[in-house]
Image (cartoon, rainbow, N blue to C red):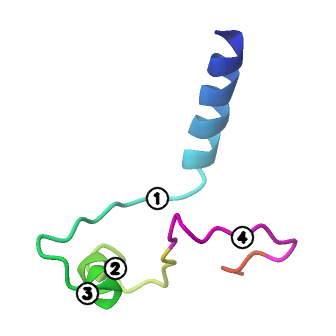
Amino acid sequence: MAGKDRDLKKVRKITDLADICYVGQKNLKGLGDAIACAERHTGGEPFAVLLGDSITKSAKPCTR
């Protein structure tokens, strides 16, 4: 159980680094439509679209 508590603390620390928003599409119309649905949550600021099936680890972050 101690390992799970440690993992939970790590996850909570990571989630404090960014505002994460999940947007679900009412009708599946593709990735472009999903991004358009999320755009209203950005306040006109730049944002990143992160797809869970294509995560890459790099010394230079892709969002830099």
Q: Which mark is residue 33?
A: 3
Q: Amino acid at mark 3?
A: Asp
Tell me the SS state at disc 1: loop
At horizontal 66% and vertical 79% (from top left) the residue drawn is 63
Left/right placement of residue 14 relative to residue 27 reads: right
Identify the mark at residue 43; answer none if there is no mark: 2
**What secondary structure is found at the residue carrying circle 3?**
helix
Indicate the quadrant where residue 59 lies.
bottom right
Neighbour class for label 2 at 10 Å: few (<14), some, many (≥20)? few
User: Eyeballing the image, is 31 above or below 61?
Assistant: below
- Marks 1 and 2 sit apart, C-alpha to C-alpha, by 12 Å
> Which of marks 4 and 2 precedes in the sequence?
2
Q: Earlier in the sequence, mark 3 or mark 2?
A: 3
Distance between the alpha carbons at the discs numbered 1 and 4:
20 Å
Residue in view at x 48 percent, y 79 percent: 47
Which numbered disc flags the more N-terminal residue, 3 or 4? Answer: 3
